[in-house]
Structure formats: C-alpha cells, structure tokens
Image: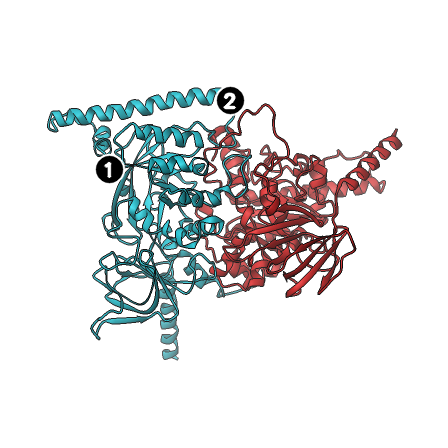
Chain colours: A red, B cyan
C-alpha cells in the first residue's frame, strides 16, 4: 500500500517537473544591469534550459534558439517582491495568536490575473505571505510567476527555503486583544506570545528527542504547530515579521537572541531607520515600503528616507509592494530611494533584486544576471529607474511570460462562463492593509 | 574648571535646543525676489529663458525684467521653474491618520449633507501638508466624502495658518452618482441585488435634486422668505448653475448615465473619477464636460481589462478632446501627484499635456485660471524651482513659493532623515 502511494507521489512529481517549462533564448546587444557585476553595454545573455549559461559579446546561439534583439534596451534580472499577497486566495487564519501550522502554499490561486499584471511590471518572483492578524502567523510561499498554468504546484519555487509570517503591534493586538479579549492586548503581550511559543516548542522538541532516544515510553502528542515553531528554533525557517515601531523591532531581536534564532527579516519596518545600527548589528533584513505612512498611528512617525538610512547603515534592505497595484511598478518604487536619500542606481536596483533574493534565501539562484542563475529577466525600453521606462518582455526560466508586442487585452486564464459581464469594482482605494485581508471585510465591508 | 562646566552646560542647552527645534517646520518669508537665469516652463507660453520677478505674492514680470538693483536675487542658472502643481482631488487637511476615525473629518453622517463645507475642517497644521508641498504641489482640491451629496469641496493652497489664508477661491458641490458596480472585491451581492439597490439609490438621488430645484423656485418667488433649510440652501447656487458640481462616476455605464443626467439639467458639471472614461471618451468629449481623473497608479477596474489601462486612461480621454485634470485621490501621499502625471505621460499622454493636467487645465476647470496654473504676469506666485524633469525621481525640487512666500523645504520626513541618518549615540551594546 505504502509503495503504491509512494510511486504515485513520484509520478505526480515527475509530471510537475515535465510541465515546468524551461526556455532557450539569446538576448542580444542590450545594456545589461547585472546588479552584482556592474553594467555591461552592448552585451548578450544566453539562456539554455532555463538557466543563464553565458554572458558576453557576440554570442552565438544554436540553431532554432529564439533571439531577442535588445539593442538600445535595458536588461535586468527579474524583479523580486519580498512581500505580496497575489496569487493566493486566503491570507489570514485569524483564529489564534499562533497559527504556525497553516501554510499559504495550500491556497495558491494560479488564476489570479494579478500575476500577469506583476509580470507586466517585470516581477518574476513574489513572496506570497500570510497576513498579520497573528503574532505567529502561517507559513508563506515563494512563487515564480509562471502565469498560464492551472496547476498551483507549478507556481511554487520548490527550492526556496521555508518562511513564516510573524506580526507585531496594532494588528495582532486589534484582532486578539480588542477583538477576542485574549493576549496580546499590548506590545508587552506580544512579546510573551513569542516567548511562550518558543519555550513550548523547545520543550516539545526535547520530549520527542527523549522519546526517540528511548528515554520515555509514550510518544508525545504530535502537533504541527509546535513542529513548525521548533523548526524556526532550529534555523530551518526564515522569520518575516510585520513590524512598524522601533521598540517592538528591538523586542523581537532580543527574543530571537535569547532563543538562538538568527534568520530574521523585518517587513514594513517603518521605524527601522530609528534602530538601523541595531538591525545591522543583528544582521536582520528590512523589507520596506518606498513611501507609505500615516495610514495608522504606528506609521505616523515615518519617513520616506527609510530605505536610504537603512542602506547607508549597512542593513540588508529591500522595497516591497504588499499590493496588487504597487507590485506592477516596483522599479519606480525603487527609484524613489534616489529622491529620498540619493542612493546610486545600483543601490536602488539592489532593493528589488539581489537584496530581496537574500532575504528569501534564494540569492544563489536569482536576483542578478550571472552565469548559472535562473533565466529570470526583464527588458525595459529605458533605464528602469526612469519614470518613462516601460517593461517590454519578462522571462521566467527563459520562457517569455510577458511580451508587450503580444499582450492581449483580456489575459485571464480562466473565464467563468456564468459571469455575464466582467464585474466593475468601484473602489480599491485605501488598500493599505492587505495584510489584514480576510479579517475585517466580512464585518466592515472592507477597511 | 568652572568655565569648563559652563561650556558643558551651554553645549547641552544648544544641543537640546537643536533637538526641540528639529520637530518643527521653520517659518516662511514673504519675498520680493527676482529668480534669475532660469528655464521657465510657463505652461501657457512655452519655455522662456530669463527671470521671474515676484512681488507682493504675485508674478510681477517674466523674461527680461527691469527690477531695481536693491531687490533680492536668486541665481537659477541651470534650473527650471514650473508653476505650482495642482492636485484636483485629495482629502488633505481633512484627514490625519488613516485608521483613527477621530482624526478624520471628511465624511459626515447620512446620505445628503451638501452644506458640509470642507474649508471649515481643514487643519492648516496637518503634518501631511509640508510633506506634500516640498514636492512642488502648491494647491489641492480637498474633497468631502460619503453619501450621495457629500458637501462642498474647496481648493486650498498648502501654506497659511488659517483655512482662510489657504483658500484658493473655488468651491464645488460634491455628488456621487449612484454606482451600478461592486463596492470592492469583498462585495458578494448578486447582479440583481446590485441593480435593485442602484435603482433605489438613483430615485433618492433624483428626488433630492428636484427638491432643491423646487426650493430654489420657491426662494425666488418668496424673495428669500422661506423656511430655513441648510441642505437645500447650500444647493441653490448649484441648481442655478452658478456653482460647479463635481459628479463622481467611474464605470462605463455610470459615466454614460451621469452625462445623460447632467444633459437634462442646467448644471455646470465636472465628472470626477471616470476610471472607465477610455471606453466612452467620445461621448464625454461630445458632451463637453470636463473631467478630473485618478489615481493613475491604479489597477484596472475589471479583471478582463488591459494591465496598463489605468495609466492610459487620461491620455485617451485627452486625445479624444476631453479637458482632463489629474487627481491622486490621496491623503498622506498626495506627493505622488508627480508620478501619477509621469505615468500618464509615459503611457500615451506625453510630458507637455501631463504637466498641463496638473496646472492650467485644473485651473480652468475650477475657474481660477486668472490666478493659478501657469507662470504669467499678474498671476499668484505659486511656483517651484527644480534641477530637471520634475516627473523623474532623480530630480530635486529645490525651492517652493506659495502666494509669494518662500516655503521652508522641510517636512517630518526630511527632519527624521537629518536626525537618524547618522544616529548619535549609535550602537551601544548592553553591559
């Protein structure tokens, strides 16, 4: 019985691998913004079997390989969004302050047209995150924008490390303290949720170790929640923590130090600039908005210079979208770091390429144009930090997923035959806390 | 020893003084000044090389000016000067913090409250205002929300210590044409339910207007001797066509219905929102109704629509002959007006027309083009100096003038940058 099951699993796995296309393409004569190895004028990039195999001048492609003329254009690595909620149809499991057992990977929605819109803005990878209703939320999924498939499995970036959403401040306090009258009702309570969960998980792991070593006779009760938290303590999962205020950021770093956890990225982290030296010292990442602020009290004392201050203080920094709108122009959001803090072109571009790749633990595969890395590329008509730049082609694993010359108006994968006319949506305004999606709209019709 | 202690005390006081000051925005100064050697983007008369002479809050002369030698000069060699940018739809001054309702004054209770006057609730000391104006945005329409007849929007300049000092002399009645669309992705109503509800809403919307018309007639017949009714009183000017009506409508169906609704009446209308204007641009153009559209940085209103259609919408309408201004529909990030216009420019509108859509076009639509919207002699001295294309993020907006006042180029955001770029004390490890 077990054998049959296993062979079925292998078969499924094999199908998934076959279905996952890998392209061969030669991109000729562009200005290549490698990110890690400088800007190379009039340079070719050869992609074979989905990987960048060669970068240089006058490269020859084998016959039959598609050639893209990039003369006068700008070739850069596919943009990576370290914080989004597109391509999934559930965001918040807002039923407990700790829900480490749930996984966004179970809710991938390959039909979401936002994936195509993101590709049209040059974004090839996004970090599909659980929401911020819980202090310890669900596990997240790093997805590749292989749009057009109907198979959720194909969107998963299988070799990406596991990540989990944590949340500090107003959101978990509002949902659990104000909403359900349970801890956390304050930032003090939030700290204790972490300390309790970490301590419990440590004891849980210890009791399993004892059982496996024959020290105790009865097996402990299995808990996927505790297994997951224990994996965090063992460094197998990267924490991505929704955060705003400086004090709470310091708190989580202290908790992590006490439990020996070092893989930590702060999300939003609007007041990160206030504790930039401490973040750099810990080695924590910061994934920030370019300019969002004042939509709630904990972001009132913010500055759009956040990314620049963090970068100049040596913090590994990225700029994210947290929005199906913003994700379409992350290149422009990165460009704002030049208005707010005069970052260089390469510093600005790193915020949306190699830096988020490092924060997701995938920088050995993506985030720069280097031989051996994935063929994730976007070609712009003008320098991507110019407001007038428009993405022309976006490639994932060497496959052209977006081509402005072949861009049909209606790009939905699945059209509901029951829908008479496409539904018009009145307002997407004040879309500021997508992180709270699934928590309030049923009650308040939205925000 | 004693002197050392005194020095320390003085140093400490100076340090504290500096810190306390860093949370405040400095004073402005009302300047008589000649901005020399600039590339002047007048908007209405092309690009002129030379000077702009500001005096008593107005533009006194442009080009080769004959200012007396004792007047202050600023060398603008290699710089550009633009008229202050105008955002045609924001809630600036009315809202402070998004999630805290007690800091929000845009939305009254009820469906009909046309007498609510936005200018009353504008907070001149909102911390959001300096954050906005240092980007060259000198003037915004601030708009009340909610219900079918929301109240009176007001054009304000982003400088002044009282709402009256900020008033830029335009008021318009804000009305929301009943929507036949979904309210958001969470809206689970069936098409039938939506239709039924919008028909009911439209009836209310119509009846109220008829009431206002009847009131106006009565008012005239009785020479003003009528029972006091603040709502209907506030609408008399709009009913007479003397006050402009800002009519919000977004879906194709609603835009067409709103045009028809306006056509039957003596209304001086401006369509706002107009998200799907590109679908019916010719109809809008034929009706001759001006449009305020935005945000430009938005997703398409239907999943079946092209990814970049919200970027293109403004340009498509403008090319069809519609007089179209751009709004952000924002609050804390009205500063992104520049980039909303920049995207419209990139996606078909072109830079020149996009600049007009945030300067002279809104000034004309709001009937204040004798005062605002371009650099011309006699107009209000709302302008800014920058070192390049203001739509590009690399460009620095160096100095803003509003009503001739030289504005401190500071905001909470710049002050925090100054304080925290090199934090002192820096890292100090415990124990």
The residue identified by callout 2 is: B190
* Snapshot quadrant of residue B382: bottom left
Circles 2, 1 touching at the beta carbon (< 8 Å): no
The chain letter for the residue carrying disc 1 is B
Above or below, B69 relative to A4: below
Percent position (x, y) of residue A265? 61, 52
- Depth check: B225 or B340 in front? B340
The residue identified by callout 1 is: B243
Q: Residue at x 63, y 46 (%)?
A: A402
Can residue A400 be seen by looking at this rendering? yes
Neighbourhood count class around disc 2 (C-alpha, 10 Å): few under 14, some 14–19, many 20 upward: few
Percent position (x, y) of residue A38? 64, 66
Neighbourhood count class around disc 1 (C-alpha, 10 Å): few under 14, some 14–19, many 20 upward: some
- Gap in angstroms between the C-alphas marked 2 and 1: 38 Å
- Badge 2 or badge 1: first in the primary sequence: 2
Q: Secondary structure at mark 1?
A: loop
* Snapshot quadrant of residue B215: top left
């Amino acid at each position: 019985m077990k054998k049959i099951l296993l062979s079925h699993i292998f078969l499924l796995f094999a199908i998934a691998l076959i279905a996952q296309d890998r392209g061969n393409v030669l991109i000729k004569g562009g200005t290549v913004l490698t990110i890690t190895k400088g800007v190379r004028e009039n340079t070719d990039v050869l992609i074979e079997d989905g990987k960048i195999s060669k970068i240089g001048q006058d490269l020859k492609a084998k016959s039959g390989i598609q050639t893209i003329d990039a003369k006068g254009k700008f070739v850069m690595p596919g943009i990576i969004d370290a914080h989004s909620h597109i391509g999934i149809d559930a965001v918040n499991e807002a039923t407990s302050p700790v829900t480490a057992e749930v996984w966004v990977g179970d809710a991938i929605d390959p039909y979401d047209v936002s994936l195509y819109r993101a590709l049209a803005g040059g974004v090839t990878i996004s970090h599909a995150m659980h929401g911020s209703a819980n202090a310890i939320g669900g596990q997240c999924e790093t997805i590749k924008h292989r749009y057009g498939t109907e198979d959720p499995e194909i969107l998963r970036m299988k070799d990406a490390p596991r990540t989990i959403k944590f949340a500090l401040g107003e959101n978990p306090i509002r949902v659990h303290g104000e909403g359900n009258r349970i801890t956390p009702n304050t930032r003090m309570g939030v700290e204790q949720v972490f300390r309790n969960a970490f301590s419990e998980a440590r004891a849980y792991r210890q009791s399993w170790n004892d059982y496996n070593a024959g020290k105790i006779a009865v097996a402990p009760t299995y808990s996927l929640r505790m297994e997951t938290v224990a994996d965090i303590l063992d460094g197998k999962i990267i924490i991505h923590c929704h955060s705003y205020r400086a004090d709470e950021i310091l708190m989580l770093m202290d908790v992590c130090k006490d439990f020996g956890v070092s893989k930590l990225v702060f999300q939003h982290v609007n007041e990160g600039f206030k504790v930039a030296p401490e973040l750099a010292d810990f080695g924590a990442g910061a994934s920030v908005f370019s300019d969002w602020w004042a939509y709630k009290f904990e972001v009132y004392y913010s500055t759009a210079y956040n990314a620049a201050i963090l970068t100049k203080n040596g913090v590994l920094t990225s700029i994210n979208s947290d929005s199906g709108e913003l994700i379409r122009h992350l290149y422009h959001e990165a460009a704002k770091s030049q208005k707010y803090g005069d970052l260089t072109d390469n510093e600005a571009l790193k915020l949306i390429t190699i830096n988020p790749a490092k924060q997701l633990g995938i920088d050995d595969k993506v985030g720069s144009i280097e031989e051996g890395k994935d063929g994730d590329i976007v070609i712009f008509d003008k320098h991507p930090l110019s407001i007038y730049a428009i993405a022309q082609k976006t490639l994932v694993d060497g496959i052209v997923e977006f081509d402005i010359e072949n861009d049909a108006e209606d790009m939905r994968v699945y059209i509901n035959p029951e829908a008479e006319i496409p539904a018009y949506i009145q307002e997407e305004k004040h879309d500021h806390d997508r992180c709270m999606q699934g928590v309030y709209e049923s009650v308040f019709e939205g925000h | 020893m004693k002197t050392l202690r005194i020095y320390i005390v003085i140093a400490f006081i100076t340090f504290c003084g500096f810190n306390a000051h860093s949370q405040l925005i400095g004073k402005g100064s009302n300047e008589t000044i000649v901005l020399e050697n600039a590339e002047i983007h007048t908007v209405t008369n092309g690009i002129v090389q030379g000077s702009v002479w500001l005096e008593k809050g107005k533009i006194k002369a442009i080009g080769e000016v004959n200012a007396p030698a004792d007047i202050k000069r600023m060398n603008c060699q290699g710089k550009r000067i633009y008229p202050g940018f105008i955002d045609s739809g924001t809630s600036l001054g009315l809202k402070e913090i998004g999630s805290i309702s007690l800091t929000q004054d845009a939305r009254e209770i009820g469906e009909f409250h046309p007498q609510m006057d936005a200018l009353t609730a504008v907070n001149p000391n909102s911390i959001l205002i300096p954050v906005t104006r240092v980007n060259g945005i000198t003037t915004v329409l601030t708009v009340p929300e909610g219900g079918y007849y929301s109240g009176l929007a007001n054009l304000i300049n982003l400088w002044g210590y009282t709402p009256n000092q900020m008033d830029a002399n335009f008021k318009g009645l804000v009305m929301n044409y009943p929507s036949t669309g979904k309210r958001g992705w969470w809206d689970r109503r069936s098409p039938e339910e939506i239709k039924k509800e919008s028909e009911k809403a439209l009836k209310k919307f119509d009846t109220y207007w008829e009431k206002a018309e009847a009131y106006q007639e009565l008012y005239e017949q009785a020479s003003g001797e009528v029972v006091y009714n603040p709502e209907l009183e506030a609408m008399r000017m709009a009913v007479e066509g003397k006050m402009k009506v800002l009519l919000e409508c977004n879906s194709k169906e609603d835009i067409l219905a709103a045009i028809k609704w306006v056509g039957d009446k003596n209304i001086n209308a401006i369509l706002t929102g107009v998200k799907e204007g590109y679908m019916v641009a010719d109809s809008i153009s034929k009706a001759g109704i001006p449009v305020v559209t935005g945000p430009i940085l938005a997703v398409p209103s239907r999943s079946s629509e092209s990814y970049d259609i919200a970027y293109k919408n403004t340009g498509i309408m403008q090319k069809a002959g519609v007089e179209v201004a751009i709004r952000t529909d924002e609050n804390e990030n009205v500063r992104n007006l520049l980039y909303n216009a920049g995207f419209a420019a990139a996606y078909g509108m072109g830079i020149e027309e996009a600049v007009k859509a945030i300067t002279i076009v809104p000034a004309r639509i709001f009937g204040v083009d004798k005062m605002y919207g371009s650099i011309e002699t006699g107009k209000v001295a709302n302008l800014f100096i920058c070192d390049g294309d203001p739509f590009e993020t690399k460009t620095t907006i160096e100095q803003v003038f509003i009503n001739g006042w030289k504005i401190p180029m500071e905001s909470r955001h710049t002050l925090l940058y100054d304080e925290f770029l090199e934090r002192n004390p820096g890292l100090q490890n415990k124990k």
